[in-house]
Each structure stands twice: as C-alpha cells, then as structure tokens.
Amino acid sequence: MLKTEKAMEMTDRKKQILKIVTEGYIQSAEPIGSKTVVERMPGKISSATVRNELADLEEMGYLEQPHTSAGRIPSAKGYRLYVNELMEHKTVTSEEAEKITSALGGRMQQIDQVVARAGQMASTLVGYPAYAVADHKQAVTVRRFELIAVSSDSFIAVVMLSDSRVKSQLMHLQLLVEEEHLRQISHLLNTHFIGISAPEMNGHLMSLSDQVEGQWFLLLNQVVDYAGELLTQAQTQQVFTGGASQILKFPEYRDADKAHELMSFISDSKEDLPVPVGGAPMQILIGPENVNDALKDSSVVIASYDIGENMRGLVGVVGPTRMDYATVAARLSYFAESLSRMFEKPRELPPGEENKK
C-alpha cells in the first residue's frame, strides 16, 4: 500500500524520534533500534508505531539502516535537520570555562603566536582534530616604519603592519650610517610607502631613484624589499593544525587506510581545510557539504573570532559525522569569544554556566 502524503510529513513525533536516534548514536556509536526509541520517548507509544516512523524517516532520507544491523543511524540530511532545529544549545560549565581560561593564561601579544597555538588548544579542549587560521578582511599594508641605529654600519628596520603585527630585521650596510641619515630615510618611507601594496611600493621606489643619492637609495631599497616580503607573506594564509591523531579514538576510523587518509589530509593538505567566507560566528559543514572528497564522511565545525584591525580568526574542528555537535559548538564558541576578548581586554572572559545542583 502506498503511504499517504500526510503520513510522510515531518511531524513533531518524527522529529522527536530523529532526535533520539541521533543523540543515541552520537553517544554510543551503535545503530539505534525501535526498543531504545520506545524507552526514551516521552509518553506511551507502541513499538509498531515507532517502527513505522523509523521506516518513514529512512524513506524520507533522514535515517539510514546499516545492512548488518536492524537499528538506524542518521544520514547527512538527518544530522543537518538535527543541528538546525533539534539540537539543544549548550553553554560551557564553570569547569570547562576554567580549563579554557587556563589554556589562554599566557598573555600572547603577537597575532602569529595566537593563531599558531589556537589549533592545538582547541583540539585539547574539544577532543577532536582542530585547525586555526587568520583571515584578512582587507589587504595588509604598512602602517609605519622605524629605523633604529645599532652600530655605525648596521640598524634595525621595524615595520608596523596594518593588522597590528610588528616585524623587525637587523640590516648590515657597506657604508657608515649616522642617526640623522636614518631619520631622513624613515621620513621618506613614512611619506611614500604607507598604506600601499607591495607592487605600488616598487613603483614609488622607482620614482624616487632620481631624487635619492645612490648609497642612500640602496638603503631605502633594502628596507622596501623587506617590507614587500612581509606584505606578500601576510597575504599567504597560514593554517595551523593540532591533534590529528585524535581521530584514531573514534570507531569510524578503525580502518587504518581511512584513518591515514584523513590524518594525512589534516596534516599535509591543511591549506585545503574549509575557510568559509562571510561573517557567521559559527558554521557547521556535515559530510557531503564539505567540498573536498577527503572530508565527505566527516563534519567540520568552524567558529570565528575578532582579531581587530580588519582581521578575523577561524578555529575549526574536524570529526566524524557522529560528532557531539552541541558540546563541540558550545566549547568552540566560548573559546572563540575568549580569543576575541583577549584582543580587546586581556583576561576578561565570557561567563560560563555555573554548575547546577
């Protein structure tokens, strides 16, 4: 007999059953049968009714039935509905908040250091492989130059970038340099080379070649070359990963080849990990929603945090589609908020949920 259109609607009861199956499978990694659903459903419901609803959910594409088991597991479509509508949003407990606060305890001044450590810290906090990246909303330029004399034939070039990073390099010369010379070159740099791209810097440098004496032009060229290299590096997105081996503890990756493929992708092809555009504070990509084939059986949860100065940071977590989305989202969200606040007011962290007894 054909099922009626009404019987195949996504009713509240079907959603409740999907929620029970999804959360049961997340906890146990074992397919969930009708008996378990009956035990966990609020109110009284017959096994026959549950079996019919499970069959409907499977036909609608929200559940799958592994051939070796009578129980069901969520499909990617089922996980998506769960995350969008059924998942209960959590906040971190006071113990989890303290753990994150402790991890961020060392005050880090440089953005590079924050991003480099964020991937490993996130992996430790959530128990899954993680990665971190700093994403520039606008092109990075130089905000200011300073040249500091060290000796008669050497100086330190200090370059302050528009993303708040400060870089410096010791430079040696074939001529004797006085502080007054360095002040004049600094003035030229801060007049002609601020707020522009590396190619524009080269154009400005050529336009000054007839106005600056040969030996001082070489000094100017040396500093501009260094600044250009910094701008080029700043536009190259660096991805830092941590905890790739955490994947081995999940039963989905008992197959050595499957585990090796994902671990290799996270470690060796990290530039291909998802870096979504847009300003959403939290994004969840489930299974085939990931463009890269290496992630088609995995889920990725990504949180963004504000670095300031036209920059945002991203922290992502990679795991099986049977991920504990609610817990991961809560911890990752708190971690991202904590990083944002660290750039504004160090050590001021968002409140965690106090234990309720």
Image (spheres, rainbow, N blue to C red):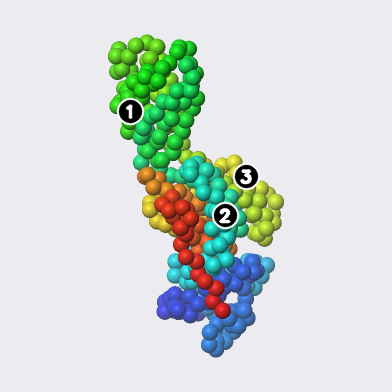
The answer to whether the residues at label 1 and label 3 have Cβ atoms under 8 Å apart is no
Q: Position of residue 110 (x, y in %)?
A: 48, 42
Q: Horizontal and vertical percent for residue 225? A: 42, 23
Q: Are marks 1 and 2 in contact (CB under 8 Å)?
A: no
> Which residue, as the protein is rendered here, is positioned at the far bottom?
44
Q: Is residue 318 above or below residue 267?
A: below
Q: Please report whichever mark, 3 or 2, sits nearer to the chain's N-terminal start.
A: 2
Instruction: Please state the horizontal and vertical placement of residue 117, each as a whole percent of the image.
Output: 55, 47
Q: CA distance from mark 3 to mark 2?
A: 27 Å
Please rate how many residues cluster around mark 3, counting C-alpha atoms within 10 Å: few if below 14, some from 14 to 19, many from 20. some
The residue that disc 1 covers is 190
Question: The C terminus is located in which quarter?
Answer: bottom right
Q: On the image, numbered disc 2 is attached to which residue?
A: 103
> Counting other residues with Cα less than 10 Å from the Cα at mark 1, is it few (<14), some (14-19), or many (20 or more)?
some
Between disc 1 and disc 2, whose residue precedes? Answer: 2
Quickly name the residue at label 3: 264
**Type of residue at label 2?**
Ala
